Image: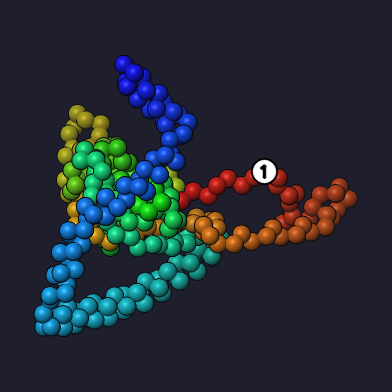
Amino acid sequence: MVAVILSLTLLVLDHRFHHLQQLRSALAFVTYPLHYLADLPFTASRWLSETTSSRDTLLQQNRELRDENLRLRAELQKYESLQAENMRLRDLVDSSFKVGDRVLVAELSSVDLDPYKQQVIINKGAISGVFEGQPVLDAHAVMGQVTNVTPLSSTVLLITDTSHALPVQVLRNGLRTIALGTGHIDELKLPYLPTNSDIVEGDLLVTSGLGGKFPPGYPVARVTRIDRSPDAPFSNVVAQPRAHLDRSREVLLVWTVPNQLPVPGDPVAPPAPLAPATGNDGAAGTGDAAPDTTPDPEPQA
């Protein structure tokens, strides 16, 4: 009974008041060497395989990488011109929506904290600027978001976990909905689409940017099955994630800055001086405003 009462007390303190966050971070810092040792066999086997590779194999891989690099650089030139054209069009319609992304490369650990959840551990933590709720991508699509941060490592909840919901839209027509995890590594469900929705098999789902967590436009999944029943108000839509959730080793941590919010670590520009008031009523001239004494909210990724 004492153990049960103590456990409930600790649960309440942690859930309501977050008093145990520092203790959890300290314990995670202490146990980090154990995670490193558990991942050591895989790292050692990969290093041994790379060391013992033949010269012909290395030359072949080098040629393939050069060819791929040339192709990607050519595609990048096209994307840069499209991005510049997009920004010019936004300026023409007087749009203030600007997104600046910076990324950090991290590596996945083969250790899983909880076998009943779709989550992984990465080797970057609070020391590297990682924060809870940060989007995580691989080379193909969105993988998930950071749910727990310690000084040297972080836990990433995958988009296929049953507790994860992601705002998405159909790239073809902009139809917005929510993609929910199913607990299966290769399946997402879209339960909130009416039976008459304009969605077909093969449609690409991308992040919509709603909710403030994920930047817009990143690929998420592709629709693989649609079941429509005349007596059901909603369709049963299933999609397959584009990210290689069970194979990717390197991931990208994304910092998104909507509306030109300052990136963490960047200096904050000083406020512009106020122009003198004009007019007989003492009101400020066009474009002037009284200084705002309300503290700015913390920027959210």
Front one among 260 and 147: 147
Is 192 rendered above or below residue 108?
above
Q: Residue drawn at (44%, 28%), measured in percent from left and top? A: 13
Q: Report x, y in % for residue 249.
A: 24, 60
Residue 58, picture quadrant? bottom left
Q: Quadrant of the N terminus?
A: top left
Q: Quadrant of residue 194?
A: top left
Tell me where residue 84 sits by quadrant: bottom left
> What residue is rendered at 41% in x and 51% in y?
151
Q: Nearer the viewer, residue 97 or 42?
A: 42
- Total numbered badges shown on the rendered structure: 1
Report the residue at 49% width, 48% height from top.
300
Asked whether, in this view, residue 123 is left or right of residue 160, the answer is right
Amino acid identity at mark 1: Thr
> Dot 1 lies on which element?
loop
How far from the left and from the top, in percent, is residue 271?
69, 58
**Residue 232 in view:** yes
User: What residue sits right under mark 1 in the picture?
Assistant: 294
Using a 10 Å C-alpha cutoff, classify the residue at mark 1 as few (fewer than 14 neighbours), some (14 to 19) or many (20 or more): few
